Image (cartoon, grey):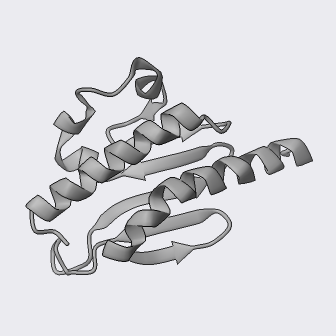
Amino acid sequence: MATTNQTDNQAQVFEALKAVLQPFASELTVKDNTETNYYLETKSRSYKGKPMFFGAVMRKSYVSYHLMPLYWNPELLDNISPELKKRMQGKSCFNFKRVEPDLFAELKKLTEAGLAEYKKAKFL
C-alpha cells in the first residue's frame, strides 16, 4: 500500500504533467478529468468514425504521460534527450515517479509537435 508521501508525490507529478497537457484541451476534447486520469481526444470523428485519442496523464503506482502522435509518427522522437528516452515505456508512453521540470518542458515541446502532426493529417 502506498504511503502518504508516495501518494502526495504521485499527486504532484500527476498535476505537473496534467499542466503540460491541459493547454492543448482548447483544440481537443476532454474525455476524462479525474484525480487519476486526464484524457484528451480529437473533436472530430477521425478514426474509424470515432474521436481519436491524443494524449493522457494516468496515475497508478507511477504517473504515465501518453502521447498518441508518437505512435503515428515515431520520427517525432528522433531528437529527444537520452533522459526522456529513459522514461519511455512502449512507443508512446513516458513514466515518472517525481516532478522533473526539464523533462516536462521537453514533453510540452513534443506535445506541440504532436498536435501539429494531427493538424497536418487533418485528424482534428
- Dividing the picture into quarters, in which one does residue 35 lie? bottom right
Going 65% across and 39% down the picture, which residue do you hit?
99
- 69 left or right of 121? right
| Quadrant location, the C terminus | bottom left
Going 81% across and 49% down the picture, which residue do you hit?
7
Judge whether 94 appears above or below 21 on screen: above
Asked whether residue 3 is in view, the answer is no
**Camera-side residue of 77 and 103:** 103
x, y percentage for residue 121? 9, 61
**Camera-side residue of 97 and 100:** 100
x, y percentage for residue 18? 55, 58
Judge whether 118 appears above or below 124 on screen: above
Asked whether residue 81 is in view, the answer is yes
x, y percentage for residue 109? 35, 44
x, y percentage for residue 58? 56, 56
- Dividing the picture into quarters, in which one does residue 24 lie? bottom left
Mark count: 0
Judge whether 67 appears above or below 6 on screen: below
Point out the residue furthest to the left here.
121
Point out the residue furthest to the top here.
82
Point out the residue furthest to the right here.
4
Going 24% across and 46% down the picture, which residue do you hit?
71
Going 18% across and 60% down the picture, which residue do you hit?
118
